Image: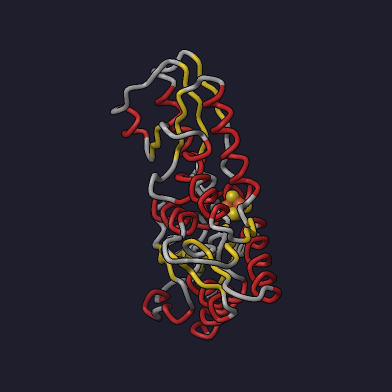
């Protein structure tokens, strides 16, 4: 059995930056350090941060003082304003690519476009983008949703940074049927596109794909979907302990990919476990 891992597996630039900032802040700060929601969508890393003193809170009610680390997905500006008004020290770990999506959405709104965000409305990144554009935007996850919208003729589009390029293109195609003027900012980040392409290519060459990462991670679950859509048997797992020996039965080549918030040590453990099962 051969195990093949995509190039660039592991932390992307934004997650690397956010975790470094969080560990540094925990090490150098006296008093309460916290994030609003998990810093990144990887439970194992969030647990390590907790061990170092970074607490995850679900809202600001009841938090009286301390240092708020803004996570890589960014934060709705109203909540940021509230945090500042409460006197919290702010450490901003928002990924610069997320900031770019926020500012393009704001620009489109300012220029009078009806703003459409391609993404998941429940995702904190999309909620932040909505906040920075002043609200009143449309969020669509798939082309079928576009058909149900009341659209204007001047439309501006941005994407949640972890969207799949093919879905983005299909949605833009659908928007073109209504628009007379369509302005598009492709805000899918490079790290996402590189991982998606490498994962898709590898899934077409192997008998089984294992996608390593948080089940709550949008970009990880999207990688798993890309592989399933390519009709390759695929499992999403968070740690090496989840590997079932029967998955590997009669498989000659196993592909491994990982979300942008999956640390290298977990990927290494998965590969080592696969190799030990093959021996
Ligand atoms: S996936 Fe892209 S946008 Fe998201 S944190 Fe990583 S680099 Fe930033």
- For residue 176, say whether it is visible: yes
Taking the view exactly as shown, the residue that stands out farthest to the left is 148
Give percent across and percent down for residue 187.
58, 39
Count every numbered label the image shows and give the total: 0
Determine whether 277 is above or below 6 in the image: below
Give percent across and percent down for residue 206.
50, 62
Which image quadrant is residue 24 in? bottom right
Determine whether 177 is above or below 147 in the image: above
**Protein image colouring:** secondary structure
Which image quadrant is residue 48 in? bottom right
For image coordinates 45% across by 38% down, the residue present is: 118
Determine whether 221 is above or below 246 in the image: above
Give percent across and percent down for residue 131.
48, 40
- For residue 7, say whether it is visible: no
| Front residue (pair 82, 271) | 82
For image coordinates 58% across by 70% down, the residue present is: 33
| Front residue (pair 211, 28) | 28
| Front residue (pair 216, 173) | 216
For image coordinates 61% across by 60% down, the residue present is: 15
For image coordinates 47% across by 28% down, the residue present is: 115
Taking the view exactly as shown, the residue that stands out farthest to the top is 180
Give percent across and percent down for residue 249.
39, 76
Q: Is residue 117 left or right of residue 18?
A: left
Which image quadrant is residue 26 in? bottom right
Determine whether 65 is above or below 241 in the image: above
């Amino acid at each position: 059995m051969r195990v093949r891992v995509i190039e660039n597996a592991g932390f992307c630039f934004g997650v690397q930056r956010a975790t470094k900032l969080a560990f540094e802040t925990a090490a150098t700060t006296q008093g309460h350090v916290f994030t609003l929601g998990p810093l990144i969508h990887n439970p194992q890393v969030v647990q390590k941060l907790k061990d170092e003193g970074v607490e995850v809170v679900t809202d600001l009610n009841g938090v009286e003082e301390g240092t708020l680390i803004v996570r890589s997905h960014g934060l709705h500006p109203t909540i940021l304003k509230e945090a500042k008004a409460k006197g919290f020290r702010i450490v901003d770990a928002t990924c610069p690519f997320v900031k770019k999506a926020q500012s393009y959405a704001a620009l489109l709104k300012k220029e009078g476009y009806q703003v459409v965000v391609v993404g998941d409305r429940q995702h904190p990144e999309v909620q932040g983008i909505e906040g920075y554009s002043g609200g009143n935007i449309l969020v669509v996850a798939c082309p079928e949703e576009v058909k149900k919208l009341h659209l204007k003729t001047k439309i501006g589009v941005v994407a949640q940074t972890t969207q799949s390029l093919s879905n983005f293109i299909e949605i833009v195609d659908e928007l073109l049927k209504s628009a007379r003027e369509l302005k598009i900012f492709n805000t899918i980040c490079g790290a996402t596109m590189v991982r998606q392409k490498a994962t898709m290519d590898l899934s077409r060459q192997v008998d089984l794909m294992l996608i390593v990462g948080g089940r709550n991670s949008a970009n990880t679950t999207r990688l798993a979907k890309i592989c399933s859509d390519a009709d390759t048997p695929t499992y999403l797992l968070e740690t090496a302990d989840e590997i079932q020996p029967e998955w590997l039965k009669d498989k000659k080549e196993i592909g491994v990919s990982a979300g942008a918030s999956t640390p290298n040590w977990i990927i290494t453990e998965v590969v080592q476990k696969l190799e030990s099962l093959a021996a």
